[in-house]
Image: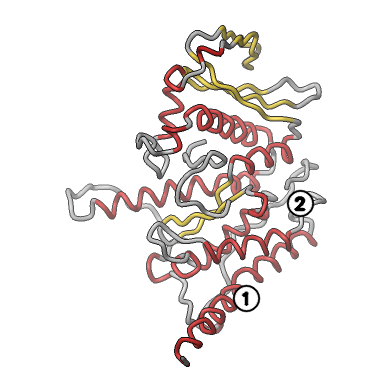
Amino acid sequence: MAATAAAPQTRSSELALIKKSVVDVVTDKVREFTEKKQLLLPANYSVENAMKSAWLTLQMTTNKDGRPVLATCTRDSIANALLDMVVQGLNPAKKQCYFIAYGDKLVCQRSYFGTIHVVKQVAGARDVYAECVYKGDDFEYVLENGHRRIVKHVQRIENVKPDNIVAAYAVIVFGDERPDYVEIMTIDQIRQAWAKSRNNPNDPKSVHSQFPDQMAMRTVINRACKRYINTSNDDHLFQEHFNRADEIAAEAEFEEELAANANGEVIDIEPAAADDDAGEEAQADPEAGPEREPEPELAPAPQTTAQTPQRSARPQQRQATLLDDEEAPY
């Protein structure tokens, strides 16, 4: 009985230690950044509430092997995932982001809701919507000074079948003097994006196969929002945090591919520097005391370069859902 009672107490102590050495450190850093005007956040965004929600989410989040990410991911990556969340003004309680482990690195991944939220906060968008184009639809668009404008889209109900999807488009509506931003992707481009998903999009049970129209619209919305933010926002450090998830995912996938082929044919390549990748030795040790854990190494704080709009990201799911798109590039 004593041993059984001690187990929950030990787990509680481990979580308290991680919270103190990671979550509290990030919260203090964010407070310092905001006081020094290095970080601007929306007036209605509560860092404390977002961090509390993230901490509860992290305690229930596991990696692909079912192990807790708080025990398998480096504390630096956990800290930076939380910082990415705050810089983008995201809150997991609102399903604007989720946390996913790539090897021993934790990433804050924006959801479909989170991406739309960011483009509204950063670019001042009023609305974002998307639609599929089916074989037989009367669809026309024109190019005007490098911008697409949809002239006509007449859809017939008999055309609305999954196998008939030929394209999808997304529109970012600003409601001011700026023209609406239109992004169009063919079904081949969409499937190429799906190929980057960690889930097999060709599996008949996958969300891509069961709901191709919903996933196609989410893919083109993600692409439109990401491209517009990267070309309209002048805060380059914000863009760094905005794009970090994709960069870490690509790096982790590359490392996994190298590991999988480690015993195969030798490839003569120049290894890339990995300044912030300490490998297996850098994994968090739940039993380590404060004196053994240095303060997490956080990414640089965003600094406003001009009077930019104030900015404001699902608990991790092992499978994609209709509301959350997992393909990497968009």
Residue 143: quarter of image: top right
Label 2: which residue?
A: 41
Q: Is residue 284 left or right of residue 25?
A: left
Question: What type is the residue that disc 1 sits on?
Answer: Lys
Q: Label 2: few (<14), some or many (≥20) within 10 Å?
A: some
Chain-order first, disc 1 or disc 2: 1
Instruction: For mark 2, give the secondary structure.
Output: loop
Q: Label 1: few (<14), some or many (≥20) within 10 Å?
A: few
Residue shown at 55% from the left, 33% from the top = 218
Residue shown at 56% from the left, 13% from the top = 157
Residue 61, x across and y down, in percent: 51, 61
Residue 272, x across and y down, in percent: 38, 52
> On screen, 165 above or below 327?
above
> On screen, 184 above or below 35?
above
Residue shown at 79% from the left, 56% from the top = 37
> On screen, 74 above or below 139?
below
Residue 221, x across and y down, in percent: 59, 31
Residue shown at 39% from the left, 38% from the top = 205
Indicate how the structure is coloured in the image.
secondary structure
Q: Is residue 155 left or right of residue 165?
A: right
Residue 226: quarter of image: top right
Label 1: which residue?
A: 20
* Circles 1, 2 touching at the beta carbon (< 8 Å): no
Residue 122, x across and y down, in percent: 72, 40
For marks 1 and 2, give the CA distance: 24 Å
Instruction: For mark 1, give the secondary structure.
Output: helix
- Could you say which is closer to the camera, residue 54 or residue 257? 54
> On screen, 42 above or below 231?
below
Question: What type is the residue that disc 2 sits on?
Answer: Leu
Q: Is residue 167 left or right of residue 256?
A: right
- Could you say which is closer to the camera, residue 238 or residue 325? 325
